[in-house]
Image: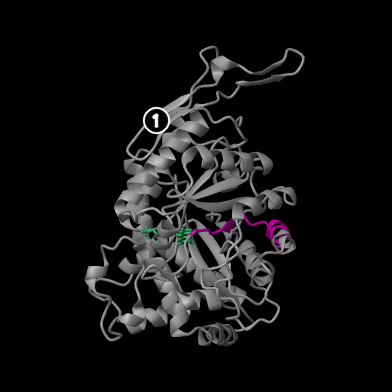
Amino acid sequence: MTKKLAIGMFQGGGVRQTWKVAGREDEPNFTDLDYWLDLARTCEAAGVDFLFFADSYGYPTLNESVIPTAVERNVQFSTVDPHTLISALAAVTTKLGLVTTTSTMVESPPALTRQYRSLDHFSKGRMGWNVVTGSAQAASALLFGEPLMPHDDRYAKAAEHVDLSLKFWEGCWEPDALVRDGAAGIWADTSKVHEIEHEGTYFRSKGVLVTPPSPQVTPVLFQAGASAPGRELAARYAEAVFLAAEAKALAAQIADIRRLSVQFGRGEDAVKCLIAGTFRVADSMEDAQAQHQAVIDRITDEHAATLYAYFTGIDLLALDPDKPIPMSAAGGDNGRTNIERFLGPDAPTVREVLEEFRANGVMGKPFLGTPEQIVDQAEAMIADTGADGFLVQPEFDGGHDQFFARVMPEMRRRGLLKDELTGSTLREHLFGEGKVLLPDTHPGAAYRVESALV
Ligand SMILES: Cc1cc2nc3c(=O)[nH]c(=O)nc-3n(C[C@H](O)[C@H](O)[C@H](O)COP(=O)(O)O)c2cc1C
């Protein structure tokens, strides 16, 4: 049987990354709630598994100051708060999974677990948390008045954050703790509501998550950030991971995540590996290429360098364009995925990295062409990498609608998509009917407290 692909739609958290780049005069206003309500309804009607909002408190900086191009061109600059937005989207949809990012560097577990649990209630079990250590960490640290924590320590903190969050979600309330008996005046059974206690390296906490269990108990855990400690975090805790690179690098990252996931006792298929890719559908390959090129032509070197600085803290325009990025940059404390990508024996020159960022940004090569050609490319990508699906970023000009109206039917025709979403919760969409809760092999399951009476 053909593997059914998971499909998520990628939205840069209100960030219109290529604002005005595509030459549209009618660029939607991302501070207008109606725009997002329409998008969520359209995604739901198309039958995708989820809509994902990227998020970060960071923005592009160099030498501790915001880069002017970022402001002028809105390069990873202007956002709205996706958590607030999701609450509204939950009200106008019934099936669509809703996923957003919260960095483990800013919100602490008691605040984050309450927020996501509330959203899981409001959406009736459709919520996912993308766990990241945070892009543009230098800007974010300055903004919050914190020292920039070393890269690998950030991942150690992320692991402890997730661990403590799981204690709150899984360990506080037994499944039947909520009594809600108005006549007797009993809210909950005290013997079944437990305080958790945590003394760790980064967090200390004693107490209770007071929001009663939501349908999924723990939201679906996503992860993005493909450095070695990022992959380890994914293999340990994530149920789905977002990856963006060329096929060869993707295949290696996916193999590594699956190997580690087995090592951690979770099995090979515990983590859905989703390839983030740009899609441009047109009537012919030539048209698609021309439209894609028109987007690239409007992106300046300054724009591309600003985007690169956002992810890495490195100013490409200050480096020798004819040499590769110096190896000394490799151990820096900003994000590493987009530095490690361009190192090694076949390292491109700085000029080529800039070109790559103008053309594709953090994504791999785009999927271009007619619907048939795009689905051929997508099928080849799945075969070459062993991935489980896609996180789709349409290029502009009604790109979502084009993807839904033209590419998805072709995927369906080839048996690549589910006929309809499985179950009503996000975890069921990804893992099948009835799989509402974390599986027993997940480390979070170890925190469950079974009632002595059950
Ligand atoms: C598709 C995709 C989506 C991502 N979304 C976010 C996001 O919303 N917020 C964020 O801070 N990082 C996001 N990242 C990951 C950052 O790029 C990553 O946190 C950063 O590179 C630091 O991690 P690293 O050192 O492992 O690379 C995303 C990555 C990919 C591939």
Residue 23 horizontal side relative to residue 439, left or right: right
Residue 404 horizontal side relative to residue 311, left or right: right
Q: How many marks?
A: 1
Q: Which residue is drawn at 77% across and 14% down?
A: 183
Whether residue 12 is visible here, answered yes or no, is yes
Residue 187 horizontal side relative to residue 268, left or right: right
Label 1 C-beta lies within 8 Å of the nearest ligand 1 atom: no
Q: Give the quadrant of the C terminus.
A: top right
Q: Residue at x 49, y 78 (%)?
A: 69
Query: Residue 98 location in percent, x, y?
Result: 61, 51
> Which is more toward the observer, 32 or 231?
32
Q: Quadrant of ligand 1?
A: bottom left
Query: Residue 45 location in percent, x, y?
Result: 72, 58
- Residue 314 occupies which quadrant of the picture? bottom left
> Which is more toward the observer, 284 or 182?
182
Residue 342 horizontal side relative to residue 41, left or right: left
- Residue 408 occupies which quadrant of the picture? bottom right
**Number of residues whose C-alpha sits closer than 10 Å to that of mark 1, classed few (under 14), some (14–19) or many (20 or more):** some
User: Which amino acid type is shown beneath numbered disc 1?
Assistant: His
Q: Which residue is drawn at 31% across and 60% down?
A: 333
Q: Is residue 51 magenta?
A: yes
Magenta-colored span:
39-57
Q: Is residue 239 magenta?
A: no
Query: Residue 177 location in percent, x, y?
Result: 60, 21
SS under mark 1:
strand
Residue where numbered disc 1 is placed: 198
Instruction: Name above or below for residue 430 compared with residue 192.
Output: below
